[in-house]
Image: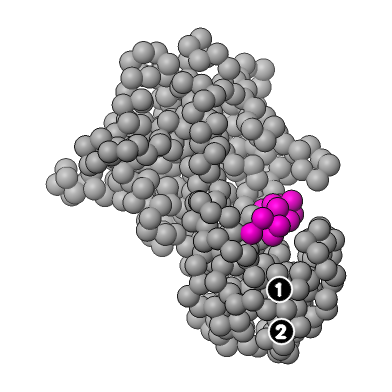
Amino acid sequence: MPDIASFRGVRYDLGHVGSLSDVICPPYDVIGPEFQEQLYKKHPANFVRLELNREEPGDNEQTNKYTRAAKYLKNWRSEGVLHTEAQPAIYVYHQQFDYAGRTHTRRGFMCRVKLERFGQGKIYPHEETLAGPKADRLLLTKACKANLSQIFGLFPDPANEAQEIAEAAVAGSPGVEAEDHLGVKHRMWTLTNPDMIAKLQQAIGPKPVFIADGHHRYETACNYRDELAAAAGGSLPSNHPANYVLMQCVGMNDPGLLVLPTHRLFRGLPPMTSAELITKLGDAFTCKVAGEGTDLAGRVWDEIEKEGKQGTLGFFTNKDQRWVLARITQAGEKQMAAIASDHSGPWQGLGVAILHRLVVENLLGGKDLPKPKYVHTIDEVIESLDAGDVGGRDATGVMSAGGQFEVSALVMPATVEHIRVISEHAERMPAKSTYFYPKLLGGMVINPLE
């Protein structure tokens, strides 16, 4: 694993803000306009004013959402709303949540991690990135000179040795707690003992890191470091904080690690019936009509999830309101291998890769479609199918186009093992291949870059 380091975090002073639950917020990429407004109203120091400041009429290069975020950060620090820790620390961070009738706890620790460009060290990406979010995050980083939210990194640790060291180091010490809008409980403890930090660093050793979430922010951190280095004549001092990025490190065998699916509702495909869809899929899939009506989404998903196979997909055709269960055949696997010959076998076998590369782009002829709407739960699938592609920007940041989603798909998520194998092949999965639930919170700790 790359070098990890403790740091003097910037944190909310609960004497000023009261409840930590009132001031935290999720990452920018899951905050829709309505939720953004709710967070603004929740508390005058809610972290959304830094993480995703509102655009205002008359914004220009000198005054805009990024400069306002920087002003809030500066003022909150000077007013004591935020304070800087007295000692360098690593932060042990738990998230307790309920899913599918069970209570889970995902455990990890936040630290500075030495930056490495992808392909030049032991930090691996697993998804493609887009230029727009990176440009946005770079402007925010340059204005605030801080990592406002953490990267989510996974590392192999079959016995959870590193986490147990961190747990032992903070056992019995007081922590802080916040509850988010989804009912997830977030707890954090401060680890300042230099001997225990050194022991944790040693346990991490040469392990690789796989980015689970935060690819855009990670590449932004590299770009920010390189801009500072260029301005300084080519390099920064080795201990400069911009050489590092704030990361939540979680062992790949942590029992609380949960990957949810990301289902797709496609924009721009022509209307078609279930029979027409089955004809287009041809001998690449064996198909059966599973029923009619949006409310059957749960039953269809239960069958897909029970099978647990990446090559089993569920399709909804809006024209006749029917569900189709499609299972890839050997002929389909051969087609996929030919179409995606530039990728490894594990990549070719991914459900999201089969869906996009084989089905949508080739069998349905949709190579230049707008981005689909991405949703994670079956309730969201049903709600979106019933409502259609309503106007405005959806919660994933994609602008709605109006009309109906003519074809939608239920697809299995990639697994942690997929991430490891495909990343080590130096490949990246299609966008939104994984959704690690729950999201890490913004506002628990800030990593200053000055």
Which segment is the magenta one? 376-388
Image coordinates of residue 300 in percent, x first then y, are 81, 64
For marks 2 and 1 on the same chain, the one whose residue lies earlier in the sequence: 2
CB-based contact (under 8 Å), mark 2 and mark 1: yes
Image coordinates of residue 145 in percent, x first then y, are 31, 34
Please give the name of the residue rendered at 35% of the width and 31% of the height, measured from the top-left corner.
Answer: 69
Q: How are the colours assigned in the image?
A: one colour
Image coordinates of residue 412 in percent, x first then y, are 70, 63
Please give the name of the residue rendered at 21% of the width and 37% of the height, measured from the top-left corner.
Answer: 62
Residue labelled with disc 2: 276
Seen from the viewer's position, the closer of residues 394 and 302 is: 394
Seen from the viewer's position, the closer of residues 130 and 297 is: 297
Residue labelled with disc 1: 319
Residue 265, image quadrant: bottom right
Please give the name of the residue rendered at 65% of the width and 45% of the height, measured from the top-left corner.
Answer: 437
**Residue 386 on the magenta segment:** yes
Label 1 CA crowd tier, 10 Å (few <14, some 14–19, many 20+): some
Label 2 CA crowd tier, 10 Å (few <14, some 14–19, many 20+): few
Image coordinates of residue 115 in percent, x first then y, are 38, 47
Please give the name of the residue rendered at 83% of the width and 61% of the height, measured from the top-left corner.
Answer: 296
Residue 334 visible, this angle: yes
Depicted 126 relative to depicted 269: above or below: above
**Residue 100 on the magenta segment:** no
Between circles 2 and 1, the one closer to the viewer is 1
Residue 298, image quadrant: bottom right
Residue 260 visible, this angle: no
The amino acid type of the residue labelled 2 equals: Glu
The amino acid type of the residue labelled 1 equals: Lys
